[in-house]
């Protein structure tokens, strides 16, 4: 996605031929040594030409070769760890990083404590003012003021399990007097857009106005990616997390648990989706529970994360 989004915002981007190691014997794993050598070579060329003062890694296999080559050349590095449970790349790179910016407590289990600073994850700044955008959001989405709104977010590509869940429950949800803003993701939109025919249901391949989307929401169902959680802490709405089990280190579940353990959200795993009606009804009918979740998740918000990370980068450069 970044190969498309970054140039759209006016920045040059270069890709590396690299991928993660599969946890079973596959042809892709046999290609990994060649990909690593190629990526280290090309990362070295990029660094030599660009001459950076500092190199930032945000985790994942793509940042590995660049930070390895930067460290070898004596260029300072900073890691921004978004998740509550870091991946193998950041665990390895952290040993030579000058600073590690994190979004959760307890990361000294994995990183040198003296180099850790809790900054949070960067978020859209327009989310800071959603409290005054309620009327605008109702108008934008043509919503009924007398009904509660459920917002379903499965990521830009979509989440199959969440889409199947909402499909199976859509009539029941409408019977509960809910109206639904359902982001199906672009991979699944064609299959689910037919549900627009149900009064109070609207499907979207992608949600462009996230500030208005969150402002309209009374309850949110979401995956538990690091960026999503950081945004939802600022948004402060009752949230049910359905983490993807198909990510490395099962980090989405660990992210969600870090919030749920603070009594700030509800966790519903994919293997537990048969409990959905019970969980949803319990939340919908308990105004006190909704208030508690709003209050507790807002306590976890770190709205100045972008500035704090930039400040650390500048300190390293100086």
Image (spheres, grey):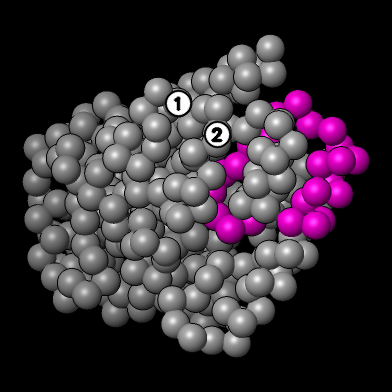
The vertical placement of 244 against 119, above or below, is: below
Q: Earlier in the sequence, mark 2 or mark 1?
A: 2
Residue count near mark 2 (Cα–Cα under 10 Å), binned few <14, some 14–19, many ≥20: many
Expressed as whole percent of the image width and height from the top left, the position of residue 33 reads: 66, 72
Q: Depth check: give the residue in front, 184 or 133.
A: 184
Tell me which residue sits at (49%, 68%) in the image.
158
Q: Depth check: give the residue in front, 138 or 73.
A: 73
Is residue 207 magenta-colored? no
Circles 2, 1 touching at the beta carbon (< 8 Å)? yes
Task: Say left or right for 228 vs 240.
Answer: right
Q: Quadrant of the C terminus?
A: top right
As drawn, the label of residue 97 is 2
Q: Depth check: give the residue in front, 16 or 134.
A: 16
As drawn, the label of residue 115 is 1
What is the count of numbered marks?
Answer: 2
Tell me which residue sits at (90%, 40%) in the image.
49
As drawn, the label of residue 219 is none
- Label 2: state its secondary structure: loop
Q: CA distance from mark 2 to mark 1?
A: 8 Å
Expressed as whole percent of the image width and height from the top left, the position of residue 146 reads: 29, 46
Expressed as whole percent of the image width and height from the top left, the position of residue 180 reads: 37, 60
Task: Say left or right for 107 vs 96.
Answer: left
Over which residues does the magenta segment extend? Answer: 40-62
The vertical placement of 84 against 36, above or below, is: above
Expressed as whole percent of the image width and height from the top left, the position of residue 136 reads: 50, 36
Q: Is residue 163 visible?
A: no
Task: Say left or right for 10 vs 106.
Answer: right
Tell me which residue sits at (39%, 37%) in the image.
111
């Amino acid at each position: 996605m970044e190969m498309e989004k970054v140039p759209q915002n006016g920045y040059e981007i270069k890709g590396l031929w690299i991928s993660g190691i599969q946890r079973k014997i596959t042809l892709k794993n046999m290609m990994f040594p060649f990909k690593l050598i190629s990526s280290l070579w090309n990362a070295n060329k990029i660094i030599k030409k660009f001459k950076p003062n500092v190199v930032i890694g945000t985790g994942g296999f793509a940042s590995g070769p660049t930070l390895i080559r930067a460290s070898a050349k004596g260029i300072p590095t900073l890691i921004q760890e978004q998740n509550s449970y870091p991946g193998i790349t950041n665990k390895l790179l952290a040993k030579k990083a000058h600073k590690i910016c994190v979004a959760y407590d307890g990361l000294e289990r994995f990183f040198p404590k003296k180099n850790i600073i809790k900054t949070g994850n960067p978020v859209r700044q327009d989310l800071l003012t959603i409290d005054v955008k309620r009327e605008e959001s109702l108008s934008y989405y043509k919503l009924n003021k007398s009904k509660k709104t459920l917002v379903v977010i499965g990521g830009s590509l979509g989440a199959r399990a969440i889409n199947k869940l909402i499909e199976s429950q859509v009539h029941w949800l409408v019977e509960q007097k809910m109206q639904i803003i359902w982001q199906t993701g672009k991979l699944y939109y064609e299959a689910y857009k037919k549900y627009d025919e149900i009064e109070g249901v609207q499907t979207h391949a992608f949600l462009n106005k996230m500030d208005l989307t969150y402002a309209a929401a009374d309850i949110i169902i979401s995956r538990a990616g690091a960026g999503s959680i950081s945004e939802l802490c600022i948004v402060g709405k009752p949230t049910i997390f359905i983490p993807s089990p198909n990510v490395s280190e099962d980090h989405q579940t660990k992210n969600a648990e870090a919030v749920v353990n603070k009594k700030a959200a509800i966790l519903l795993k994919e293997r537990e989706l048969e409990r959905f009606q019970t969980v949803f009804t319990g939340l919908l009918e308990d105004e006190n529970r909704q208030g508690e979740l709003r209050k507790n998740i807002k306590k976890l918000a770190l709205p100045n994360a972008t500035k704090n990370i930039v400040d650390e980068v500048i300190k390293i450069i100086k």
